[in-house]
Image: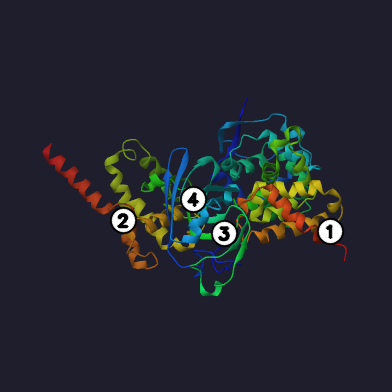
Amino acid sequence: MMKQLIFREKYVQLLKERLSHEEYLKHYSSKDFIYDKRQVLTLPNIDTTTDLLSKLDANDDYKTAISIYEAYKNLAPIQASDERIWVYLAHVDLYPYMIERRPEVFKGSSSNPSKYILDHWFLSSTSQSSLLRHSLAGLWWAVFLSIDETRGENKYNLTKILFRQIDFATRTLGTYKLGRHKEAVLGILEFIEENGDLFKRKFEDKTRFITKYLNFIGGLKPLSYYDRYFFKSELEKIREKISSIGTI
Amino acid sequence: MRFNNISFPHPVMGISDDISGDISINPRIVSGLDNYDIYIEFFFDNYDIDLLIQGYQAEFICEVTCSDTLYRKIIKSPKPIIELCISRKEVKGRVDFTCLVVSRQFISNYSNAASHIDYRGFNFDIDPGEVLAYFGEFWFNADIRYEKLKAVSSFMDIVENKESEYTNFDLKKNKIEVQLPTLDYKIFSSDSIGKESKYASGFHSSIVLNALIIALYNFEDHKEEYQWAKVIDYRLKNEKEFESLGIAEKENIPEIAQRLLGNPFHRFLETLEIIVNSGKED
């Protein structure tokens, strides 16, 4: 079994710097990304998954997220927030997926190729929002935050709800510190699961509302003190308000 | 939660002048090979809050967060001391701690005898988890190996520069990078020179000191983003010998640089003296 490779930090910086030169941008238009194979390090505790690429689906973020998470479930949080591994995967192991999922530079249709690549292939920082917005890291972290091991074989049921709407994980939950508290995330997702009819319409508006509302409570209470049942009961209190969204 | 410029619906000790009395924490962080061990002692002087704690209606908590790894944890204790262990694998960059007393259950008609006159005569219903006392916050940087801070390698690297005949200094990296031209780098990295400990003071008082002084003159522009600046910032704020040396005053920079390197000129001249004297004995 081969060990997972990552890029050296200096090489990641070099790849970023090169984005401002047109001669290097054309590399992202080719089917294989050419890189310096000497600029890699080995992650001793992570094995590669040889058939991972075949499991990814550019049209199904949920399925792709589960596959990536399963392949890299042994990543420690410090590794999963390390830009080097995600930049390597985006440029090497999972590059074919990347050009299919984020095709604008590959197809030549991007108005700002440099920014496009920077936004999707790299991390702007290791902040919560940057991690959740990355094309690969965001998928892994979304599963990490929403997986419920107590459900056994249904452990990804709540993850499925998270991927129901494209920005829910990245821009809605991901923007708030609330998104860092797993019990809060599970509580919100369980409430949505148990009240399916309530969220049939205006899902995006309603999830934005409830996230904002709970974050507001966090201004006066230490949210990480509470378990998922607290968050569910708080949302239950505002059921009428949620229901009224989009009706006016 | 933020505790600056905030007013709760009920009096909270440690917030503004809601409740009079002393309140503080004494945190201690021990950096181990695999973990960080944190010890926090809570100190406060308030009868009503103490009564709630003794009656298990309230408890001490410490909230730990690390935004770089989405880490968030609460440690609870019925006693005014909290001990916790955080694996190095779970955190990166800044790790924040907030210390509070919160209610464990619904408390009806709460009042505090030491509260500000504005609250006198009012009773409050407190929900589980509500803050009753704020002890303060502290943080540390998990990227900094505190036990290795004094080593030059904690903030500087010497590397080869194939493209220039002259040495270049790059401050826009996690460590200050001294880029030696190829020929010079070969000499520096040879076993008989670069790895010879008796020449270390020579390197410190020349190459390293030069680079460090340049970096310190540009410190403000880099201290938010680069690891080398954060390492130096930590030393300047926590080591006694820098107490009276503010980096904002540029005339202090040569002395700061020399102190950071443990007086390299003196060590170099001492080394020369030893070499000369041992030569005479031969």
The answer to whether the residues at label 1 and label 4 have Cβ atoms under 8 Å apart is no
Q: Which residue is mark 4?
A: B174
What amino acid is at disc 1?
Answer: Ser
Comparing marks 3 and 2, which lies closer to the viewer? 3
Question: What secondary structure is found at the residue carrying circle 2?
Answer: helix
Q: How far apart in space, not on screen, are marks 4 and 2 (Cα)?
A: 21 Å
**Chain bearing mark 4:** B
Q: How far apart in space, not on screen, are marks 3 and 1 (Cα)?
A: 31 Å
Q: Residue at x 82, y 60 (%)?
A: A240
**Chain bearing mark 3:** B
Question: What secondary structure is found at the residue carrying circle 3?
Answer: strand
Question: What secondary structure is found at the residue carrying circle 1?
Answer: helix
* Residue B153 figure quarter: top left
Q: Residue A2: percent from the left, percent from the top?
A: 62, 27
* Residue A172 figure quarter: bottom right
Comparing marks 2 and 1, which lies closer to the viewer? 1
Between discs 3 and 4, the one toward the N terminus: 3
Q: Residue B56: percent from the left, percent from the top?
A: 54, 50
Mark 1 and mark 4 on one chain:
no
Q: Residue at x 75, y 52 (%)?
A: A168
Quadrant where the N terminus of chain B sits is bottom right
Q: Which mark is residue B259?
A: 2
Q: Is residue B175 above or below residue B195?
A: below
Q: Residue at x 39, y 58 (%)?
A: B237
Q: Which residue is mark 3?
A: B131
